[in-house]
Image (cartoon, rainbow, N blue to C red):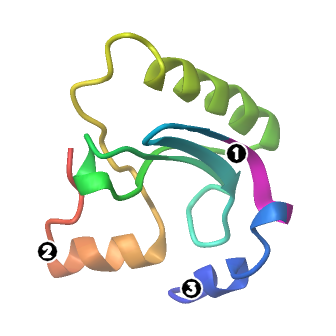
Amino acid sequence: MLFDFLSMADNYEQRKVDRFEKGELTVDTCSVSDSDKPYETAIEHPRYNAGKWVIVELYDTREEAEVGHKKWVKKMTSKKLPTGLKDISTAEIAKLADILGTDWRKK
């Protein structure tokens, strides 16, 4: 449903799988209620999407999310950062933005 994201308000600590913060980089993995899969990893870094969050991977299980989180931390802390990140969000609000033709998915 379009407003499923509201059930995620004020309960981040319960939903958090892992979070990495260093300088301008944040890699956050948590459970979500507004996506096709129940877990996602998001990256925030000024080099990508004007410093706004980019959903980079979705997972079916907490175990997959834990492995994925470590993979993204390793990738984002390597000497050579990726040239771009593709937002793969399947949140209902993202789907609506896609239908409306907004150019919100930045690389």
Q: Are marks 1 and 3 in contact (CB under 8 Å)?
A: no
SS type, badge 2: loop
Query: Residue at the spot x=18%, y=81% of the render?
Result: 100
State the mark number for residue 101.
2
Which one is earlier in the sequence, the residue at label 1 or at label 3?
Answer: 3
SS type, badge 1: loop
Distance between mark 2 and mark 1 Cα atoms: 28 Å
State the mark number for residue 31.
none
59 or 44: nearer the viewer: 44
26 or 91: nearer the viewer: 26
Quarter of the image where the C terminus is located: top left
Distance between mark 1 and mark 3 Cα atoms: 19 Å
State the mark number for residue 60.
1
Instruction: Find residue 1 and report its horizontal and vertical position in percent.
Output: 56, 85
Magenta stretch secondary structure, dominant: strand
Viewed as shown, does residue 48 lie left or right of 45? left
Q: How many marks?
A: 3
